[in-house]
C-alpha cells in the first residue's frame, strides 16, 4: 500500500501523503528527528556521569546549637561530574540517620532538593529536644553508597557554655595536678642528684646550661627554675654570673614537656593512671613508688588534656571565641595574651599544652601560635620578677637578666614570624600520617607548635651563650650591686618556696646549720679574751651572737620540720634528724659560752686574780685545741666524710688525754706553792672542764655521722 510519494520539482522534492497512515508515520519520523537533535545538542548528563557528592565542597558539618533550635548554617553539598564540573537539576536527598534516644521535634526544611546552576543543594536543620549527636545523610540516589555524605550535628543543653567553663577548669586542674605529681615523683627520684649537681656547679657556661636544662626537665616548669635561681642567688649559694647559663638551659628544658605533650596519647591516659596508681600502692621501695607517682601524674596530665580537648570542641563554631582567636593572629595581641596567661598558670609548658589542644581542635594555625609561644616565654619572666621583689639586689639581677633575655628574643622574632613559620614547616614531623592531606596537616600542627617552642629557645640560647661575659657586664652596668645593710636576726639560706622540693630545701637548711656553727665557733673564740686580756667589752659581742644562735635554732628546726612533713625518703628523714642533732649540740656549746663562761668572765674581770705565765699558756693552748675540734666538726658536717668523722673522734681521744696532762701540770704548780696558780686554781679548772665539754659536744656530730654510716 502506497503511503506517500515524492514528486520532483526544481530545486528539490514535494512529499505528498497518500492516506492517514502516511500522515501518522510522518509525524513519528518528525518526532524521532527532533528527539535525536535535542539529545545531540545537550550534554549527556546521566546518573553514571554524576560520580560523587563532594565531601570537600560540603559545608555545615560539626555544628552546635541549643536543643530545639535551628542550626545557624545550612547543610550544603555540591554535585559534580567526572570532570569536576557542577551539575544542575540533580535531586539530592537529605535524611536523618541517627539521633539521641527519645529525641523529638527534629526535622529538615527540605528533604529533596534540586541542585542549582552551581551544582549546590542545601537544607536547614532543626535540632530535637534531646542533647547529643544527630547525623544527617545527603545522597543523589536516596541510599548509601559512594555518593553518601554524612553530617555530624550536636545539640547542646541551654547551660552548655557554663558546662564548657567547668570542664575547662576541671581539665586544666587535672592537667596542672598531673604535672605536679610527675614533677614530685621525678624530684624525689633525682633530687639528690640535682642537689649534688648544683652544689658542684662550676663557672663553665656549657655545664651551667646543661644543669639548667636538666633541672627544668625534672621540675617541669621554667618559671619554677627561675624562682629557684632567684632564691639560690639570694641565699648566696650561687653567683649571678652562674645563673645566666642555668636560665639559658632552663629555657631549653621547658620545651621538653611540650614535646611530650605533643604526642597524642590521651587515649592511653587512664592506662598510665592505673599503672602508676598500683605502683604507688603495691611497691615498697621508695624509688619504685616515686616512679609510680610520676607515671600516675603523666596519665592524669593527659587525661586532663583529653577533658579540655572535648570541652573546647563546641567552641569551633562559637563565633565570639573564634573572633577572639582571630584577633590573636595579630603579633602584638598574641604576645601580650601569651605572656599574661602564662604568668597566670605560672608554667610555660602548661600554656603550650593548651595551645596544642586548641590547634588539635582546628582553632589555631601555626601562624597564630607563634606570637602566643613568644608571649609564653616572656610570661615566665613575670614570675621571676615577682619572686625577686623581697630579695637581695644580686638576686634581682637574675630576674632582670632573664626578662631582658626573653624580651630581646621577642623583639627580634616579631619581625620574622612568617620566615620562622616557614622554617618550622620545613622541619620533618615524625610519627605523623597523611602529610599531603588537610587532615595530615592538622595532625602535624601540635608537633609543629612544640617544635616552634624548642627552636625558638635553641636560637635564643645560641645567640646569648657565646656572649655570657659581656651580658654579665651589661647587667651589672644597668643594674649595679649596692651595699645592703643586713639585719642581725635573719636567715640567709632558708626559703619557704623550696619546701615542696625537699632535696633542695635540705641543702638550704644545711647551709643555715653551717652558718649557726660558724657563729658558735666565733663565740667560742671570743670567750677566752676576758680571761687572758680582761677585755670585758667582748661580753656584749657574745650576747649579740647568742641572740643570733637562738633565733637560727628556732628557724632551722621549724624549717626542717616542714620538710619532714613532705613525702620524703628515709635517707632524707635521717639527714633531717642529723641536722637537728647538730643544731642541738652546737646550741649547747653556745649555751656553755653565753651562760657559764660569760658569767665566769664577768666575775674574773671584777677580781684582781691572775693566771700564772705557764697557766695562761696552757689555757691558751687548750682553747686553741678546742677551737680546732669545733672547726673539724664543722668541716665534717660540711663534707659528710666518713674519714673526717673518724678523724674527729680520734682527735677527741688525744684532746682528752691532753686535758689530763694539763690538769696534772696545774696540780704540780699548786704543790710548788705558785701564788697565781693557787688564787686562780678554781677558775683554771672550771675553764678546762667547760672547754672539754665544748669539745665533747663538737665530737658528738662525728658520732652521729658514724652511727648513720655503720647502719
Image: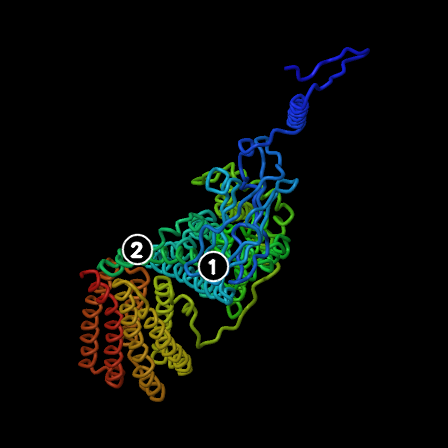
Circles 1 and 2, Cβ within 8 Å, touching? The answer is no
Of mark 1 and mark 2, the one earlier in the sequence is 2
Q: Nearer the viewer, residue 482 or 93?
A: 93
Q: Nearer the viewer, residue 372 or 186?
A: 372
Q: Look at mark 1 in the image and give the residue it sits on.
A: 311
**Label disc, if present, on residue 164 of the rendered structure:** none
| Quadrant position of residue 176 | bottom left
Q: Residue at x 18, y 77 (%)?
A: 668
Q: Residue at x 34, y 77 (%)?
A: 528
**Which x, y percent locates residue 214?**
41, 51
Q: Look at mark 2 in the image and give the residue it sits on.
A: 291
Q: Residue at x 55, y 39 (%)?
A: 54
* In the image, residue 70 above or below residue 87: below
**Which x, y percent locates residue 24?**
65, 25
Task: Classify mark 2: helix, strand or loop.
Answer: helix
| Quadrant position of residue 678 | bottom left
Residue 40, visible in the rendered structure: no
Q: Say how many tags the image has.
A: 2
Q: Residue at x 28, y 79 (%)?
A: 612
Label 1 vs label 2, nearer the camera: 1
Task: Classify mark 1: helix, strand or loop.
Answer: helix
Residue 223, visible in the rendered structure: yes
- Left or right of 347, for residue 292: left
Amino acid at each position: 500500500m502506497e503511503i506517500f510519494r515524492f514528486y520532483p520539482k526544481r530545486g528539490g522534492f514535494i512529499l505528498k501523503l497518500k492516506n492517514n497512515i502516511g500522515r501518522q508515520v510522518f509525524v513519528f519520523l518528525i518526532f524521532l528527528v527532533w528527539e535525536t537533535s535535542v539529545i545531540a545538542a545537550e550534554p549527556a548528563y546521566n546518573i553514571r556521569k554524576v560520580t560523587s557528592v563532594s565531601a570537600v565542597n560540603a559545608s555545615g558539618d560539626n555544628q552546635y546549637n541549643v536543643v530545639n533550635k535551628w542550626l545557624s548554617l545550612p547543610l550544603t553539598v555540591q554535585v559534580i561530574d567526572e570532570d569536576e564540573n557542577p551539575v544542575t537539576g540533580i535531586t539530592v536527598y537529605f535524611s536523618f540517620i541517627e539521633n539521641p534516644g527519645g529525641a523529638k521535634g527534629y526535622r529538615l526544611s527540605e528533604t529533596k532538593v534540586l541542585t542549582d546552576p552551581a551544582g549546590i543543594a542545601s537544607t536547614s536543620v532543626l535540632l530535637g529536644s534531646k542533647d547529643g549527636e544527630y547525623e544527617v545523610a545527603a545522597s543523589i540516589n536516596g541510599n548509601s553508597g559512594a555518593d553518601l555524605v554524612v553530617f555530624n550535628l550536636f545539640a547542646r543543653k541551654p547551660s552548655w557554655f557554663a558546662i564548657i567553663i567547668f570542664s575547662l577548669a576541671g581539665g586544666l586542674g587535672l592537667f596542672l595536678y598531673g604535672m605536679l605529681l610527675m614533677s614530685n615523683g621525678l624530684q624525689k627520684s633525682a633530687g639528690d642528684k640535682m642537689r649534688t649537681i648544683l652544689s658542684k656547679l662550676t663557672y663553665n657556661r656549657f655545664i651551667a646550661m646543661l644543669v639548667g636544662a636538666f633541672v627544668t626537665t625534672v621540675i617541669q616548669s621554667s618559671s619554677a627554675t627561675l624562682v629557684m635561681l632567684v632564691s639560690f642567688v639570694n641565699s648566696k649559694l650561687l653567683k649571678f654570673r652562674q645563673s645566666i647559663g642555668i636560665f639559658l638551659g632552663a629555657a631549653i628544658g621547658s620545651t621538653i614537656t611540650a614535646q611530650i605533650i605533643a604526642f597524642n596519647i590521651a587515649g592511653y591516659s587512664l592506662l598510665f593512671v592505673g599503672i602508676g596508681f598500683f605502683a604507688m600502692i603495691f611497691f615498697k621501695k621508695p624509688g619504685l613508688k616515686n616512679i609510680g607517682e610520676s607515671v600516675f601524674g603523666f596519665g592524669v596530665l593527659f587525661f586532663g588534656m583529653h577533658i579540655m580537648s572535648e570541652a573546647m570542641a563546641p567552641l569551633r563554631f562559637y563565633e565570639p571565641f573564634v573572633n577572639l582567636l582571630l584577633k590573636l593572629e595579630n603579633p602584638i595581641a598574641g604576645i601580650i595574651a601569651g605572656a599574661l596567661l602564662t604568668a597566670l598558670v605560672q608554667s610555660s609548658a602548661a600554656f603550650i599544652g593548651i595551645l596544642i589542644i586548641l590547634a588539635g581542635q582546628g582553632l589555631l594555625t601555626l601562624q597564630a601560635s607563634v606570637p602566643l609561644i613568644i608571649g609564653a616565654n616572656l610570661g615566665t619572666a613575670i614570675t621571676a620578677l615577682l619572686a625577686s621583689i623581697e630579695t637581695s639586689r644580686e638576686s634581682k639581677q637574675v630576674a632582670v637578666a632573664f626578662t631582658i633575655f626573653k624580651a630581646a628574643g621577642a623583639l627580634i622574632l616579631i619581625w620574622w614570624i612568617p620566615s620562622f613559620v616557614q622554617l618550622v614547616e620545613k622541619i620533618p614531623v615524625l610519627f605523623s600520617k597523611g602529610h599531603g592531606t588537610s587532615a595530615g596537616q592538622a595532625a602535624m600542627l601540635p608537633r609543629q607548635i612544640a617544635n616552634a617552642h624548642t627552636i625558638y629557645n635553641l636560637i635564643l640560647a645560641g645567640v646569648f651563650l657565646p656572649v655570657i661575659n659581656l651580658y654579665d657586664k651589661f647587667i651589672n652596668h644597668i643594674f649595679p650591686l649596692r651595699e645592703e645593710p643586713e639585719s642581725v636576726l635573719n636567715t640567709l639560706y632558708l626559703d619557704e618556696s623550696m619546701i615542696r622540693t625537699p632535696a633542695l630545701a635540705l641543702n638550704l637548711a644545711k647551709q643555715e646549720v653551717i652558718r649557726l656553727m660558724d657563729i658558735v665557733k666565733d663565740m667560742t673564740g671570743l670567750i677566752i679574751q676576758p680571761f687572758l686580756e680582761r677585755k670585758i667589752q667582748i661580753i656584749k659581742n657574745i650576747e649579740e651572737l647568742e641572740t643570733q644562735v637562738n633565733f637560727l635554732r628556732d628557724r632551722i628546726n621549724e624549717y626542717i620540720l616542714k620538710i619532714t612533713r613532705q613525702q620524703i625518703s628515709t635517707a632524707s628523714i635521717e639527714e633531717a634528724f642529723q641536722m637537728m642533732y647538730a643544731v642541738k649540740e652546737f646550741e649547747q656549746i653556745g649555751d656553755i659560752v653565753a651562760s657559764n663562761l660569760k658569767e665566769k668572765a664577768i666575775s674574773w674581770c671584777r677580781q684582781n686574780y691572775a693566771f700564772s705565765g705557764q697557766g695562761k699558756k696552757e689555757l691558751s693552748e687548750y682553747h686553741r685545741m678546742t677551737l680546732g675540734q669545733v672547726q673539724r666538726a664543722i668541716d665534717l658536717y660540711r663534707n659528710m666524710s666518713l674519714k673526717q668523722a673518724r678523724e674527729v673522734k680520734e682527735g677527741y681521744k688525744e684532746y682528752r688525754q691532753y686535758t689530763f696532762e694539763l690538769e696534772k701540770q696545774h696540780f704540780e704548780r699548786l704543790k710548788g706553792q705558785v701564788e697565781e696558780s693557787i688564787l686562780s686554781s678554781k677558775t683554771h679548772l672550771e675553764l678546762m672542764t667547760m672547754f672539754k665539754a665544748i669539745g665533747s659536744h663538737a665530737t658528738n656530730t662525728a658520732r652521729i655521722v658514724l652511727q648513720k654510716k655503720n647502719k
